Structure formats: C-alpha cells, structure tokens
Image (cartoon, helix red, strand yellow):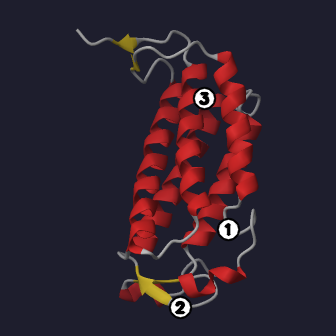
Amino acid sequence: MKVYTGTGDDGTTGLLYGGRVAKSADAPEAYGAVDEAVSALGLARAEAGVAGKEDALLLRLQRELFVVGAELATAPENRAKLTDGVSRVGVQMCEALKNDLDEHEKRLPELRDFVLPGENRFAAALDMARSVIRRAERRCVGLFAAGTLENPQLLQYLNRLSDLVFLMARDAEENIRTVREE
C-alpha cells in the first residue's frame, strides 16, 4: 500500500464509509486536532519512558483518541455504522476516565493556586497534550453546536480527558510551583 494516493491533491479528504470533504472543513479540523493530541500524548509517553508508571494509561488514551477520530471522520449519515469503543465514543469510555480521574485525585493535594507548567519534561509534555486536547474539544463543541455531531459522550470524553491529563501533569511535577494572585 502506498502512502500517497493523490486523491487529496485537490484539497479534499476521504471519510470513513465514503464521501469526501474539504480538508479545511470543520470535521477535519476537529479530527486533525485529535490527531495532534495523539502525537502530544506520544511525546509525553516518550518522555516518561516505557517503564514509566503512566505508560499503560497513556497508551490506552492514545488508542481511545483513535476512536474519537474515527467518529469525527465519519459523515453524520454513516455514524449508525459505528461501534461503541471501537469507532464511536461510548459511555464506558467516559466512565473509565471518571475512574481514572478519581484515582489520580486521591494522590494529589487540593489545588489552591494556578499551576505553572514546566517543572520537568514529562509534566510539560502532558501540559502541552492537555492544551491540544482542549483545542480538539473546542472544535468538537463547534460541530455539536452546528448539529453535525450528535454524540454527547464524545464531548464528555474530551472534557474528562483534558482534566485527567492535567492531573497526570500535576502528579508528574517534582516540585509544584504555583502562580499566586497578588
């Protein structure tokens, strides 16, 4: 299989189950941001190393973002063909994130101030990933508002994911520095 097909040379991209849209359309913007989030989490995984305590979780999150991307890369009229947890975000994925959030919150002191990212490379990579996830979430909120995305679990998933990655970054900080309001 060749990497290039030439079909996108006209500025369009193919969708799952058929159809083409402009690469600049709202859906490709959304799943493009999700793709960036997968890469950003990959950078965090690389910084942590394969022996890192969060490696398995980060790998799971990357794979789950492929599910998010698959749903976004499917035309609305074909989304009934998708399968929860495989190509569509389902309730179980959101519940798993809720459990992950609860587990990480137990380990951390209550947050009372703003956190300044950058105490170490792993935490900084997680903070960058969180920012990219938030951008993907904003793009998906736009799709939801326009009526071209109907699955509220997808929005819930991205919101919870960014919260989880924030907690993971806090947990990774060796010495949390905060910015205090004067």
The alpha-carbon separation of the residues under discs 1 and 2 comes to 18 Å
Element under label 2?
Answer: loop
**Mark 3 Cα-neighbour bin, 10 Å: few <14, some 14–19, many ≥20:** many
Say which quadrant the C terminus sits in: top left
Q: Nearer the viewer, residue 55 or 95?
A: 95
Q: How far from the left and from the top, in percent, is residue 5?
A: 54, 86
Mark carried by residue 88: 1
Q: Nearer the viewer, mark 1 or mark 3?
A: 1
Q: Indicate the amino acid at tag 3.
A: Met
Q: Which residue carries the number 3 mark?
A: 168
Dividing the picture into quarters, in which one does residue 98 lie? Answer: top right
Q: Earlier in the sequence, mark 1 or mark 3?
A: 1
Q: Indicate the amino acid at tag 2.
A: Gly
Residue at x 63% of width, y 80% of height? 79
Mark carried by residue 119: none
Q: Indicate the amino acid at tag 1.
A: Arg
Depicted 92 relative to depicted 169: above or below: below
Residue at x 48% of width, y 88% of height? 20
Element under label 3?
Answer: helix
**Mark 1 Cα-neighbour bin, 10 Å: few <14, some 14–19, many ≥20:** many
Dividing the picture into quarters, in which one does residue 41 lie? Answer: top right
Residue at x 55% of width, y 75% of height? 73
The alpha-carbon separation of the residues under discs 2 and 3 comes to 38 Å
Depicted 99 relative to depicted 87: above or below: above
Depicted 70 relative to depicted 132: above or below: below
Element under label 1?
Answer: loop
